[in-house]
Image (tube, grey):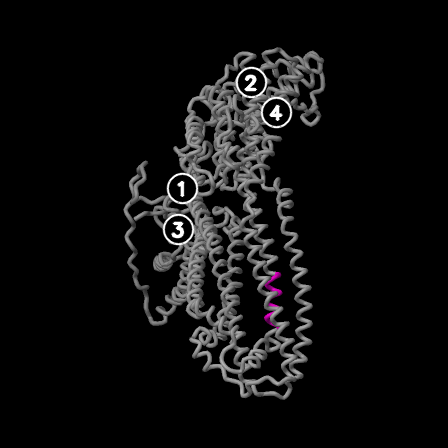
Amino acid sequence: MALPTSNILNLPFRRTQPNSLSTALHAYISSSYNQHPSLFTADLSTIDTLRRDATTITDAHPSDIRKLHTYTAQLVWLTSKFPLDVGADFVWYPSLGYHADVAASANNLRFELANVLFNLGVLYCQLGVYANRTTQDGLKTACNYFCAAAGTFRHLKDVVVPEMRAVVPEDMDTATLECVEGVMLAQAQECFWATAVKGSYRDSLIAKVASRVAEMYKVAEEAGRRSDAVSSEWIHHLKAKQGHFGGVAQLRAARAALEKREYGEEVARLREGLVCANEGLKEARYINKTVLADLQGLKVKLEDDYKRAENDNDIIYLKIVPSKMDLPLIEGATMVSAKTPKEVLEPVPLLHEGRELGKPLFVKLVSYQVHLAASVYASRRDETVQRIVSELEGLTSEIHAILQSLNLPGSLQALEKPLGLPPGLVSHAEEIRQQRGIVRLQAAMDDITKLKQNDRRIYEEGVSALRSEAEDDENARKKYGTDRWCRPPSNDVAQHLYNKMTEIESYFTAAETTDANVLSTVHKNESVIRLLASSDRTLEDAVPSARRTTIPPTIEASASKLRTIVNDLTRLESRRRRKIETLKTKGQDDDVNPDLFKEAARLERENPSQTIEAALFEPLFDVRLERYDTDYALITSERDEQSTLLNTLNGANTAFNAARRGDTSSKDREQALQTLENAYFAYKEIVQNLDVGRKFYNDLAGIVMKFRDEAGKWAGERRREAGVLEGEIVNALPVGGLSVGGRDQHTQQQQQQQHRQAQQTQQQQQPQRETGPRTAQANGSTSAVPVVAAPAPAPVPQNRTWTEDMPINFAPRPSKQQPAAGQSQAQAQAQAQAQAKDGRWDPSKGLKFG
């Protein structure tokens, strides 16, 4: 806004609500760090003091600059220690636009930083406005303040806002910030122009400086017209300033031409100067008295000089006056530039004990990026361990598959122990009994079902929020039309949320397939698993005995060899299981934090201005992950050893089957034992899959909760934005929401339907009116049937004040409708009745309410 007694624009401060940032930081340290918040009591108190000092500035004073510099520097520093969404909801009110009372809030440290930096630019602007611009030193001071303000707004536009990761306030969009930056630069250039005038610089130089002022104001005006937050008051002011300094540039260029005795050019430039001044005076109704007085004084000066120059040239010099197209352009001379203060551009290196901005807070708190790096390493470590474990377990599964295909060890057990239960089967049954068999599986499946239902419910809440908002947005677009409801559709604005929704849906779809496979495996093996979980007596009854109790010598040798190889495979599997447990323990004990803290301290010590990021620790990660190279090598050795044993197993089993060819004495027992053995391994596989499923749905819970929260927050912000837009549209409509130039779609359809009905009625009545008199004459009637006309309404008394019972007339109302020439009274009355049935609105009859 422009001050009533100032010819330049001023900016008001943004307002905020009190916020205890320390409370959010305390809670986050307590929940996310391994350090107790009590270690940082002094820092927590300091950050609240800094915010209070920086956000309660009402009157501009140079001492306030340090307050804002200190707080913004600490905010930048905090983003290296904490995530942006640390848990503090910052509420700020805009300083520009038509919605200064509509607050914007965000749980985002960069949102807070952007608003405080905006106020820093405002502070520089106000210091420039209130500087003593009647002296050379005062003008230089004001110019420097305006340049600093422009640099601050440019930094805000180019650096801070693009990285904010929050909804950008209306008066912080690119167009608004470009306009504000342009205004600051134009006013700085204007201060330099005033300095040049007071310093009696050459007219040619002053003309170039003034021309550049006009160009800068034009750039600012163009940006302001693209913004929804820049008021019309600013636009009129900027337009008037363009005309003023365009005229000043031409006036000074005319004087320079006079010095060079270019009398024709002098006249032409004074003429163009008057054109510029008149263009500026077109905004006279909307600008303050100071700006208007400057323009009027300029015009008087231009008119006087123009009359004198034109008279002299016409009488004395007789020089040709060039046209506007032939006049050389006045090349603007840029004397100012946006200067971002070092405290804004690189604040972190200035945070040090004994320096102006003080020491950085939470120095002893491990950086958030370090914790993020620790989580990145933990993820890679777990991925590495899981990859090795999966390879080893895959080798074990290969052993089980081959043994089952060879009907082992069932064929050996039936031969070696023709009566009773084999020891291996007894141990397997005892293990399943201790784990409660089917009861455990059923409980695990019930838990997974509850987790899945809970995840699905949370996910549907987020989906419902998105779809409800999209439906409301589409209904409003249909209601008001795309010309009024001009904001982009929901799925375009929140593309990342809709992509996340599709991604999560794919998770559920894949999980449904996996769950169905696991359930099918359970049902397939349920009866056998129940049998394994029963008593030994029940198992003995279920396993038939062999008809022969002794092993023939021809079979005993091959069976012994085969048993040795099977035992070797069993020992290999046992060793591998122990190696897997050792590897998992090794991964759990792999704590990278001590090395990370040392590396972070080294990086901060060697380069304090460097921003600590997780990517800086990549070399450390590579070195630490090398310790798992030996475990990768274990996969190769295990595979080679297993391959050798399996080849030997195939040969021994072939010999064993050849030796017992034709022997069916233990066939039934062999099949029963193998079925129980297969059911045991199926049970182990099911347990493992259920554990994986439980972990999957627990991890998915965090993903869907985050999705629901983000979707709900975004939908709420969109609804608030829609409420503001709808209020603007409703306020822009005429009384009752009616518009003479354009009605809503429903009203138009209704009126079109009434119009068609009226036309049909009129077409049906027209033949009757045409044939009526002829029919009467044919019947011998000599007169038409009289029609009683409706009494004319009483005249409405003229009154300057409109009331609800009075119509709104759009055209002069005829006093009385007379029958047309050649038209009988009956025909006129019939036509009037037909028109009365027509549902179309007659503008001459106006609008009545009630």
Cα gap from disc 4 to disc 3, whole angstroms: 62 Å
As shown in the figure, which amino acid type bears the numbered disc 3? Asp
Label 1 sits on residue = 731
Query: Sequence order check: which comes first, mark 4 or mark 3?
Result: 4
Query: Sequence order check: which comes first, mark 3 or mark 1?
Result: 1
Label 2 sits on residue = 298
Viewer-side residue, 741 vs 351: 351
Relative vertical location of residue 270 with respect to residue 372 in this rendering, above or below: above
Q: In the image, which residues are magenta?
A: 391-402
As shown in the figure, which amino acid type bears the numbered disc 1? Asn
Q: Which mark is residue 337?
A: 4
Whether residue 449 is in magenta: the answer is: no
Cα gap from disc 2 to disc 3, whole angstroms: 53 Å
Label 3 sits on residue = 842
Between circles 3 and 1, the one closer to the viewer is: 1
Cα gap from disc 2 to disc 4, whole angstroms: 27 Å
